[in-house]
Amino acid sequence: MRKVTHKAVHEGAHAVETMRFNVLVARTMELVNATRKAIDSGPGPSDPAVREAVEAVAVMLSLVTPYTAEEMWSRLGHQPSVALAGWPTVDPELLVEDVVTCIVQVAGKLRAKLEVSPSISEAELERLALADESVVRALEGRGVRKLVIRAPKVVNVVPE
């Protein structure tokens, strides 16, 4: 929950700096959804990480929906105003990703999603991509003419 919160706050700050308020709203909505999921299935509403997330939502919303944010801030027990709260501090250690989702496409169609380390080697990523059942089925009877790897996030397989 804390990683999701700090990532949303970090990306929200960048969105504000670049005047992309629609992105700020999107990141806030993602944080609200993650918080709701944590409340329903995880630690519950009394967890400090959940409270941190809700406070971050209030601060992020204060830029686009000030009255709603003020109401939230008041219900959280804070005084005097969310406008005086300042932007939440981001912990850089919580921004480091342990796992990234790699998309594997065969002939331009999504065939697999692999959860891999961001520091995975290209050779290992190629091995994992070509070993996936969906990729093997899509290549059935055909060889690989070309394999393009873009960072650890996308693998494009061009069949013969």
Image (cartoon, rainbow, N blue to C red):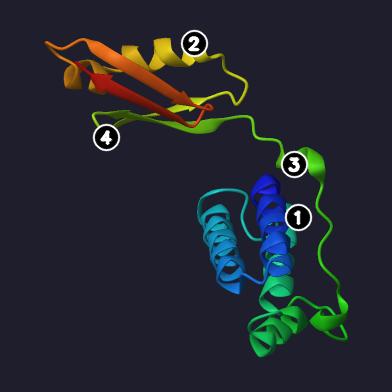
What residue is shown with label 4?
Answer: 108
Q: Quarter-wise, where is residue 45 in the image?
A: bottom right
Q: Is residue 72 left or right of residue 38?
A: right
Amino acid type indicated by mark 2: Glu
As displayed, is residue 50 above or below residue 23?
A: above
**Residue at the image point whose x is 72% and y is 52% from the top:** 6
Counting residues from the N terminus, which is met first, the one under dot 3 or under dot 4?
A: 3
Give the residue drawn at x 74%, y 73%. 59
| Label 2 or label 3, whichever comes before in sequence order | 3
Decide which of tag 3 and tag 1 comes sooner along the chain. Answer: 1
Give the Cα distance between marks 3 and 4.
34 Å
User: Where is mark 1, residue-wise?
Assistant: 48
What amino acid type is highlighted by mark number 1?
Pro
Pointer 3 with pointer 1, Cβ within 8 A? no
Say which quadrant the C terminus sits in. Answer: top left
User: Which comes before the other along the chain, label 1 or label 2?
Assistant: 1
Question: Which disc, if any, is residue 94?
Answer: 3
Instruction: Tell me the tag on residue 124.
Output: 2
Helix, strand or loop at label 1? It is helix
Gap between marks 4 and 2, in whole Å? 21 Å
Task: Report the residue at 88% width, 86% height from top.
Answer: 80
- The Cα atoms of the two marked residues, 3 and 1, are separated by 16 Å
Look at the numbered disc 4 and give the secondary structure of its residue.
loop
